[in-house]
Structures are given as structure tokens and as C-alpha cells.
């Protein structure tokens, strides 16, 4: 049969169904399910299938319609009270509920139109005197149970706490000077060591350093010497021994001399 | 406090606060009972009506707020930058209607009535501030429950959700009867 | 336009605009001459006076604005100002105790004794009126010296600071030693 449906956008399957019921001028309580189902299927057949979500919703309704159409052909089921169940009943309920929503939205749209002329303020406009107002202090509440004795106890506690903070013995010691490790001195030391050993491991060099600072400075000195080409480093494997090799012992000795001179001058 | 003075005080408060003021808070500020406060509000409203004022007081559930009377809108738009009217599509309006009438309601319930997924329309209604989350339903998955906001009341000029044409049994019956007769006319109007 | 209606329109405009509106702009919105607009404003003003309104219209140079009448500020305060918590916290009590026993004393001295920055507790004690500025110390930066107030004495029910429970001998000796260092300088400052 001819499809009396112009292809237009519908909000959903119920919207389409309502439309079909309206244009067919049929009673919502007595839907000619066969006709409507055919028209519905014909419509979704021509529908833009790009939006899978929308399409699936229309397909679910199509399945429901086909299910109802089948059940209409079978002998009617009966409910607990022996009354025949109309297979369309559930669909009618849904359509009615939807129709109600449509009616309510039309109502809301009208209300929105009427309300549109009223303008509300969104900001408060409080005078400065109000904003700056400080409530008077309720001293009775503020002081509460505190008395002069409380203040006295608190003060004594503070003084005691303060005394405890200062260690009576250690506070008599002078300040301990922080030992500065001179990079140049360390460079001289490393040069001397390398001249004496020629080839050594990084680990061995570090074993002779007393503090963390010394280790760090020694490491920096090694990096510096590698950069200037005095030594070469070799490591066979990750975390393995780092071998330090002097590339030019004579040059190193020269540098050692000049370095020491610089220091003494 | 004398009624006249209380009305003026309420007016001062509502004007300065700008946004809606709960009747409860107003009654505290005026140092009178909520019942008397409601009377004061009514007095203020009457004053605005009698004197052809440009402003009026509207009730929004259990709060009140001053606003301009809609008949002066034409003057306002000549000078004030009135917030743009939110244009609601049919889809948004349908979802909003369901929230308004069925609140508190979940996304799934709204989708079941409309027969389509409503995620995006719910998101848009939330972003417009017309609906809000009310909490979670004590059901599997603890879905979020939605309800309308004060902004909804303002936008649609309703004092309270109760004021919406209610859907009691009587009305539903009437509606069903009507449905068959009027049907087409009403619908063709909406779907156009 | 009828005067009554013009007054209402002006009221709606002024309400919606919130801030001050130039008479020139108002006259455009009302579609009338500035002279007539001034008349309308006078009418609005008269209406507010006659009817014991909570709001009024103020004129500033060539602009007008709605504002709350000052006689209703007390109601605004009751609704707008958030009651502050007023209790003496441990921090406040410590600072107060130090001021009480070591006055006159500077912020830095209090901080040194407590081992923490005391700026905010000093500010709060000042705002409560329990301590006050006594002058400035003759030291680098001329720091402010603080002492307890008469309100402090009243609140703690004593006539004089001498009534503070005295400290034990050991402490007094320590204080005396310290005092000698700071000595006279301090005191002479107070008399200024």
C-alpha cells in the first residue's frame, strides 16, 4: 500500500507512531495494528540509518508492533479474572503516557512564553555599611570558662615548652662549622691518585672518600676530567665496574703542578 | 513591628539580596513568625499591584524574589541586556515536562516514557540549570534522580511545582476522554 | 505615555539595571525628553516616600539608581552577615596570655615565644578589643607594642593587671634579666 508518510524527522518511535495514528484518523484504543505496523515498517525502511542509537530505538518498536500483530492472530490470553487481554493494551498505555507528555510540553512552552517578560536580578546589592558591619563581641561568650588562672597556666606551659626546646648542654657548644669541600683541592687529589695508579676503578676511588659530599665532589671531578679529555671511562655492563684510565699522564702531571701553584698563590 | 514597616523592611531585604530569599530566612530577619512573614509578603505584593509598580514579588516554592512585571519588558530590552531566552526543542521540552511532573525521576524512567535515549537532553537541561540532581534512587545501580530547579520556576513563571496542571486521576480520566476528540488538532500543532 | 505608567517603566528599568542609569539613557528607553524623564524620576521618588518603601531612588550627577533606604540596614545585616564564630581558640589564648604577662610586647616577641607566626591571632585579639596598641618600640623597624585593654580586665573580672596570678620565682628572675636588656626604652615609649 502507499505510504502516506512524508519523510520527516521524528523524536522517536512513539512520535512516529502517534503521527501514523493521527493521519490514519484511528482510535488510539482500537489501533488497526496490521495497517499501522506496515506503515511503520515502511517508514523505518526509508529512514536515515546513520544514527545507530536512534535507529535501534525505532527497530525495537518495530519488533514490538510485529509481536502485537502476531498475538492479535492468536487466541486471546486471559488474565486472572478471566478477561481477555488485548495485546495492544501495553502499547496504548505507552502512547497515552507519551501523549500526556506532549500535552504537558505544549503547556510548558506557553508558560515559558508568558514568563519571558519578567526580569530577575542575579546579583546582590548590599550597601557598604552592611558589608562592613562587624557584630558586637559578646564577651561573656567569648571568654567562656577561661579565667586569669587559665591564662596563667597557659603562659607557664608556653615558657616550659620553650625551655624544653633548648637543650641545656648542646646549647653551650659553639656552632659547628660546615666543612666545605674545595673542588680544586679534590681535583688535585684525584690527579695525584691517578698519576700514582695509572688505571683504577671508580669504586676504588670512592672507597677513599669519607662523606657523601666528598663522593659527590669526586664524581663531579671525574666528570670534569673526562670532559677535558684527561681520562677515559669504560663500563662493560650496566652497574658494572667503571674503569678510569689516564690518557696522557704527562699532561696530567703538568696540570697538577699548575693547579697547585694556583692554589698557593 | 507595624505591618507597613515590615513590608518596607521586606522590600529592602528582597531588593538588596537580589536573588531569591527563603521565607524562613526572611522571617528571621524580620523577627516574626513565618505565618506573619507570608502575610507581609502578601502585603508587599498587594502594594505593588495597587500602585502600578514596575516590579512585583514572586514566590518560588518556599522562597520569594523581586522581579520586573512582564508588561514593561518592551522598555527593558531597549536599555538592559536581558538574558537570552533559552530556546527549548521539542525533545528538551518533552524531557523537561517528564522531570517536572514525575520528579524525582531517573534517566531510564524518562527514556522509557519518551521511547528514546534521553542522555543528551538531560545533559542540556542540566547545563541550562533547569533541572538538577536530587540524589540517588535506592535501586540497582543507584541511578541519579532528577528534579526541577528554582530557575525552572522562574523561567516558566510558576510559583511552585504544585501549580503545574496536576495529573491526578480525575484529570487523567478527563484527559483520556478528551484525547479521542481533540487528538489531531493539538498534535498537528506540536509536531509542525 | 501616561505618567503613572512611565514611573512604573522607569522603576522596572532601574530595578533590572541594578547599577546607576544615566538620565539620558533612561529617557531614550522611555521615549521621552530628558526633562520629562526628570519629572518621572521625581514621581518615582515621591511614590517611594509616600508609601514607606524599603527602597528609594538616588540621583548621582546625571544618573539615577535604586538603593535600599538606610533605616532598613539593620534588617539587611541580620540576613546578609554571616555570624562569625567567636571563641578563644588555643592559639588566641596563648597569644593573649603572652601579651598579658609580657606587655608591652611586640608581634615578633610573641611569635618568638610561641614559635609560630602570630599575625592572625593578634589581629583577632585586636578586633575583639582584648588587646590594643600601646605605642612603638624603639628598635629597628619601630615595631608596634601590644598590651591588654580595659575590656580585657572587665572580661576577666579584675581591676588591674597586677591581679594576674604571679609567676614563680625562677620565672620572675628570668624575666627580670630579660627586662633589663629591653629595659627603659620600652617604657618610655608607652608614655607618648
Image (cartoon, coloured by chain):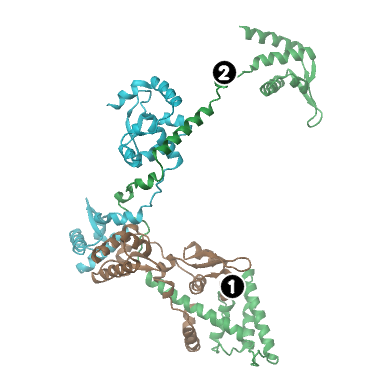
Chain colours: A green, B brown, C cyan
Residue C4 drawn above or below residue A171: below
Mark 1 surroundings within 10 Å by alpha-carbon count, few (fewer than 14), some (14 through 19), many (20 or more): many
Secondary structure of the residue carrying tag 2 is: loop
**In the rendered image, which quarter contains the C terminus of chain C?**
top left
Residue A3 visible within the image: no
Query: Split into 4 quadrants, where in the image is the N terminus of chain C?
Result: bottom left
Question: Which of labels 2 and 1 is toward the front?
Answer: 2
Are callouts 2 and 1 both on one chain?
A: no
Read off the residue under disc 1: B116
Instruction: Give the labeled residue for mark 2.
Output: A173
List x then y, in percent, for residue B134: 51, 65
Residue toward you, C183 or A218: C183
| Left or right of residue B91, residue C9 in this image | left
Q: Image check: A260 left or right of C78?
A: right
Would you say residue A114 is visible in this rendering? yes
Residue C75 appears left or right of A31? left
Residue B53: image quadrant is bottom left
- The residue at the far right in this view is A236
Residue A210 falls in image quadrant = top right
Which element is circle 1 on? loop
Q: Nearer the viewer, residue B166 or A7?
A: B166
Q: Chain of mark 1?
A: B
Q: How far is the residue under mark 2 from the one under mark 1? A: 83 Å
Residue drawn where x is 35% and y is 40% of the image = C156
- Camera-nearest residue between B191 and A120: A120
Q: Is residue C97 above or below residue B139?
A: above
- Residue B63, x across and y down, in percent: 38, 65
Q: Position of residue A124 (x, y in %)?
A: 35, 56
Amino acid at each position: 500500500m502507499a505510504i502516506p508518510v512524508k519523510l520527516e524527522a521524528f523524536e522517536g518511535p512513539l512520535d512516529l507512531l502517534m503521527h501514523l495514528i493521527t493521519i490514519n484518523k484511528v482510535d488510539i484504543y482500537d489501533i488497526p495494528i496490521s495497517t499501522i505496523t506496515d506503515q511503520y515498517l515502511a517508514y523505518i525502511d526509508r529512514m536515515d540509518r546513520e544514527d545507530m542509537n536512534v535507529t535501534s530505538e525505532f527497530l525495537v518498536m518495530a519488533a514490538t508492533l510485529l509481536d502485537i500483530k502476531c498475538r492479535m492472530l492468536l487466541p486471546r490470553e486471559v488474565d486472572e479474572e478471566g478477561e481477555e487481554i488485548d495485546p495492544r493494551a501495553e502499547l496504548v498505555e505507552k502512547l497515552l503516557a507519551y501523549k500526556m507528555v506532549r500535552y504537558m510540553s505544549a503547556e510548558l512552552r506557553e508558560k515559558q512564553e508568558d514568563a519571558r517578560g519578567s526580569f530577575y536580578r542575579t546579583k546582590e546589592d548590599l550597601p557598604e555599611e552592611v558589608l562592613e558591619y562587624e557584630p558586637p563581641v559578646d564577651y561573656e561568650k567569648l571568654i567562656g570558662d577561661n579565667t586569669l588562672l587559665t591564662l596563667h597556666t597557659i603562659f607557664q606551659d608556653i615558657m616550659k615548652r620553650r625551655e624544653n626546646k633548648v637543650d641545656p648542654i648542646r646549647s653551650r657548644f659553639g656552632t659547628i662549622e660546615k666543612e666545605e669541600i674545595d673542588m680544586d683541592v679534590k681535583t688535585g687529589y684525584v690527579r695525584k691518585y691517578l698519576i700514582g695508579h695509572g688505571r683504577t676503578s671508580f669504586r676504588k676511588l670512592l672507597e677513599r672518600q669519607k662523606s657523601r659530599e666528598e663522593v659527590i665532589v669526586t664524581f663531579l671531578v671525574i666528570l670534569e676530567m673526562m670532559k677535558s679529555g684527561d681520562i677515559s671511562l669504560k663500563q662493560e655492563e650496566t652497574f658494572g665496574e667503571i674503569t678510569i684510565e689516564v690518557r696522557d699522564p704527562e699532561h696530567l702531571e703538568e696540570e697538577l703542578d699548575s693547579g697547585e701553584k694556583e692554589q698557593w698563590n | 513591628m507595624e505591618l507597613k514597616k515590615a513590608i518596607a523592611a521586606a522590600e529592602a531585604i528582597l531588593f538588596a539580596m537580589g536573588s531569591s530569599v527563603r521565607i524562613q530566612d526572611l522571617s528571621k530577619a524580620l523577627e516574626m513568625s513565618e505565618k506573619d512573614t507570608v502575610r507581609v509578603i502578601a502585603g508587599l505584593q498587594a502594594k505593588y499591584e495597587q500602585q502600578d509598580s514596575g516590579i512585583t514579588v514572586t514566590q518560588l516554592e518556599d522562597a520569594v524574589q523581586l522581579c520586573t512585571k512582564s508588561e514593561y519588558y518592551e522598555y527593558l530590552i531597549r536599555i538592559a541586556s536581558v538574558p537570552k531566552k533559552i530556546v527549548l526543542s521539542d525533545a528538551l521540552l518533552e524531557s523537561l515536562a517528564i522531570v517536572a511532573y514525575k520528579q524525582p525521576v531517573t534517566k531510564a524512567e524518562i527514556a522509557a516514557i519518551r521511547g528514546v535515549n534521553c542522555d543528551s537532553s538531560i545533559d542540556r537541561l542540566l547545563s541550562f540549570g533547569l533541572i538538577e540532581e536530587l540524589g540517588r534512587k535506592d535501586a540497582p545501580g543507584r541511578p541519579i534522580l532528577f528534579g526541577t530547579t528554582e530557575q525552572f520556576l522562574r523561567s516558566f513563571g510558576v510559583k511552585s511545582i504544585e501549580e503545574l496542571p496536576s495529573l491526578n486521576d480525575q484529570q487523567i480520566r478527563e484527559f483520556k476522554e478528551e484525547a479521542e476528540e481533540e487528538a489531531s488538532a493539538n498534535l498537528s500543532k506540536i509536531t509542525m
